[in-house]
Amino acid sequence: MATAKDLRRVALSLPGTAEAPHFDRAAFKVARIYVTLAADGRTANFMFTPDEQEFKCMMAPDAFAPVPNAWGKKGATTATLAKLSIVELKSALEMAWQHAQPKKAKRC
């Protein structure tokens, strides 16, 4: 069972990650936010691709659900931390972290 403390520890171990406030949540970002932690520490919103979201929700429907708004259609996914193992949490964080990297400069 994962906790808010686990999320914070693992997220901050990923290279370039910084924590900052984001409305009523804690946000973890590199160039962009890749996960936010609810103030009560029970849930987190991950920024996945729509395909990754579909896969996570299919594999662990008790743990993952699309955010119920336009962000959810773009891949934003709520996870109930208590329903995740540490391994599942780490996998989700690493997946979302990949999308938060700075864009590579295009060559002419």
Image (spheres, rainbow, N blue to C red):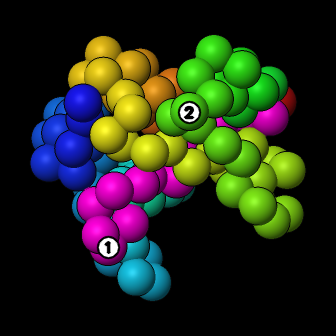
Rendered view: 74 above or below 63: below
Q: Can you say which quadrant of the picture contains the C terminus?
A: top right
Q: Residue at x 77, y 27 (%)?
A: 54
Rendered view: 82 above or below 70: above
What amino acid is found at the position of numbered circle 2 in the picture?
A: Asp
Residue 75's disc number: none
Q: Is residue 39 visible?
A: yes
Inter-mark Cα distance, 1 to 2: 21 Å
Image marks 1 and 2: residues in contact by CB distance under 8 Å: no
Please report whichever mark, 1 or 2, sits nearer to the chain's N-terminal start: 1
Residue 36 pos. (x, y %) = 43, 59
In front of the other: 73 or 64: 64
- Asked if residue 79 lies left or right of residue 103, the reply is left
Q: Residue at x 34, y 56 (%)?
A: 42
Residue labelled with disc 2: 62
Residue 43 belongs to magenta span: yes
Q: Residue at x 72, y 20 (%)?
A: 58
Q: Quadrant of residue 21?
A: bottom left
Q: Element at badge 1?
A: loop
Residue 70 pos. (x, y %) = 84, 63
Rendered view: 47 above or below 29: above
Residue 40 pos. (x, y %) = 29, 69
In front of the other: 86 or 107: 86
Q: Which residues are magenta?
A: 38-50
Q: Element at badge 2?
A: loop
What amino acid is found at the position of numbered circle 1 in the picture?
A: Ala
Residue 73 pos. (x, y %) = 85, 50
Residue labelled with disc 1: 39
Residue 36 belongs to magenta span: no
